[in-house]
Amino acid sequence: EPEVTQTPSHQVTQMGQEVILRCVPISNHLYFYWYRQILGQKVEFLVSFYNNEISEKSEIFDDQFSVERPDGSNFTLKIRSTKLEDSAMYFCASRPRGRVETQYFGPGTRLLVL
Amino acid sequence: KNEVEQSPQNLTAQEGEFITINCSYSVGISALHWLQQHPGGGIVSLFMLSSGKKKHGRLIATINIQEKHSSLHITASHPRDSAVYICAVGKTGNQFYFGTGTSLTVIP
């Protein structure tokens, strides 16, 4: 069964460094998402992406964040200058065409900013 | 402000018990999702509902759009059902609001 994959599974970085989190969505999916979950807190929506552009983003998704689909298979989340409070689990998800379809989640990348 | 409220926050049940987890939301939605998060952190989508009721194995999900309420039921619960169950609502299909989750422990 096809699945969403994410790399790396864990990343440790110094505050102020740039990080890129990578996701490979399911191949025929058209809508892509990033979520984050700070330890002990609820999952939060960051951004949705369709047709090579951001379709919606939350207040969390400020200028420090960017997303890209550089090569038609990868979907990346870049954090330009990491802060301590960016430490969280980051989940990618994708879904196929259709107004309301279930999302498929990746296993997550655990980011720790020191 | 919480757009999505779940109850209970924590639930412990004996194996075999019938379990109900509730979700209330305050925004107009296009769909509601029930998700399962395992101790390792991975998230699995269980159901997506826009109306009525869905059943998958021992899991049943219902939604009442007028009352802005959904329930997830687990029949004949088993220790492997132990996980955090999360309700998430989508307003437009592309932005989702998540509940804080219900932590379920099923004791053998």
Image: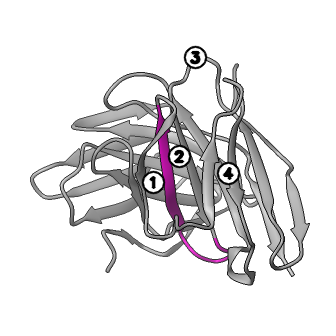
Main secondary structure along the magenta-highlighted residues: strand
**Point 76% across, 44% down: residue:** A22
Q: Quadrant of residue B31?
A: top left
**Relative vertical location of residue A74 with respect to residue B35 in this rendering, above or below:** above
- Magenta-colored span: A38-50
Say left or right for B65 vs B74. left
Q: Which mark is residue B76?
A: 2
Whether pointer 2 and pointer 1 mark residues with C-beta atoms closer than 8 Å, the reply is yes
Same chain check for tags 4 and 2: no
Instruction: Mark 4: give few (<14), some (14-19) or many (20+) Cα within 10 Å.
Output: many
The chain to which mark 1 is attached is B
**Relative vertical location of residue B45 with respect to residue A15 in this rendering, above or below:** above
**Point 31% across, 80% down: residue:** B1
Q: Nearer the viewer, residue B42 or A52?
A: A52
Looking at the image, is mark 2 or mark 1 earlier in the sequence?
1
**Point 34% across, 53% down: residue:** B89
Instruction: Say which residue label 4 marks.
Output: A77
Q: Nearer the viewer, residue B3 or A57?
A: A57
- Alpha carbons under labels 1 and 3: distance apart: 38 Å
- Alpha carbons under labels 3 and 2: distance apart: 36 Å
